[in-house]
């Protein structure tokens, strides 16, 4: 499953629903949750090592210097590949 996180509101996300084989993509305002030392992000990373973030959304919000280094930064072409390889999808918004 692919979990897409497009919200900066951590109360709408339940990391208990994420398993080790799932992938998580932070995008749109969800990239705000991918900053260093965020407890929710730590919970998600402990659930799965397959965590991604879109480079253009990081840059658009000026967060390049504070994004957690454990995330894999990807471009839109890689997002397409990620969605093709992980089905179904769950969007947290």
Image: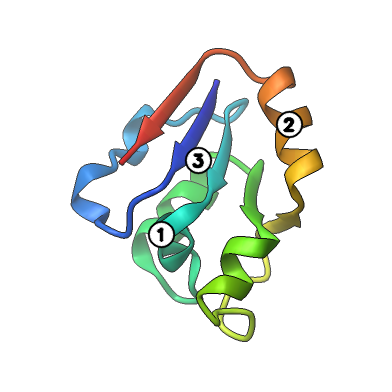
Q: How busy is the neighbourhood of tag 3: few (under 14 within 10 Å), some, or many (20 plus)?
A: some
SS of the residue at dot 3? helix
Quadrant position of residue 64:
bottom right
Specify the farthest residue to the left: 11
**Which residue is identified by label 3?**
47
Which residue does the image show at 32% across and 59% down from the upper left?
Answer: 8
For label 1, the SS is helix
Camera-side mark, 3 or 1: 1
Q: Which mark is residue 44?
A: none
Q: Quadrant of residue 68?
A: bottom right
Residue bearing mark 1: 29
Q: Position of residue 15 (x, y in %)?
A: 36, 40
Q: CA distance from mark 3 to mark 1?
A: 21 Å
Q: CA distance from mark 2 to mark 3?
A: 23 Å
Q: Earlier in the sequence, mark 1 or mark 2?
A: 1
Q: Is residue 75 above or below residue 36?
A: above
- The disc at residue 80 is 2
In the picture provided, is 17 more to the left or to the right than 31?
left
Q: CA distance from mark 1 to mark 2?
A: 19 Å
x and y, in percent, of residue 90 in the image? 42, 25
Which of the two labelled residues, at mark 2 and mark 3, occupies the earlier sequence position? 3
Vertical comparison of 81 with 24: above or below: above
Disc 2 is placed on an element classified as: helix
Whole-percent x, y for residue 53 in the image: 62, 54
Give the x, y percent position of residue 60: 56, 72
Left or right, 82 with respect to 92, comes to right
**Residue at the front extreme, as displayed:** 60
Identity of the residue drawn at 59% across and 69% down: 58
Picture residue at 45% right of the left edge, 76% below the top: 37
Residue that sits furthest to the bottom in the current view: 65
Which numbered mark, 2 or 3, is in the foreground of this view? 2
Quarter of the picture containing the N terminus is top right
């Amino acid at each position: 499953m692919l979990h897409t996180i497009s919200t900066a509101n951590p109360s709408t996300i339940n990391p208990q629903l994420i398993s080790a084989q799932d992938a998580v993509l932070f995008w749109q305002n969800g990239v705000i949750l991918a900053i260093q030392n965020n407890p929710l992000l730590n919970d998600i990373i402990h659930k799965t090592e397959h965590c991604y973030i879109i480079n253009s959304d990081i840059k658009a919000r000026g967060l390049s210097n504070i994004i957690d280094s454990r995330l894999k930064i990807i471009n839109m072409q890689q997002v397409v590949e990620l969605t093709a390889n992980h089905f179904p999808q769950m969007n947290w918004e």
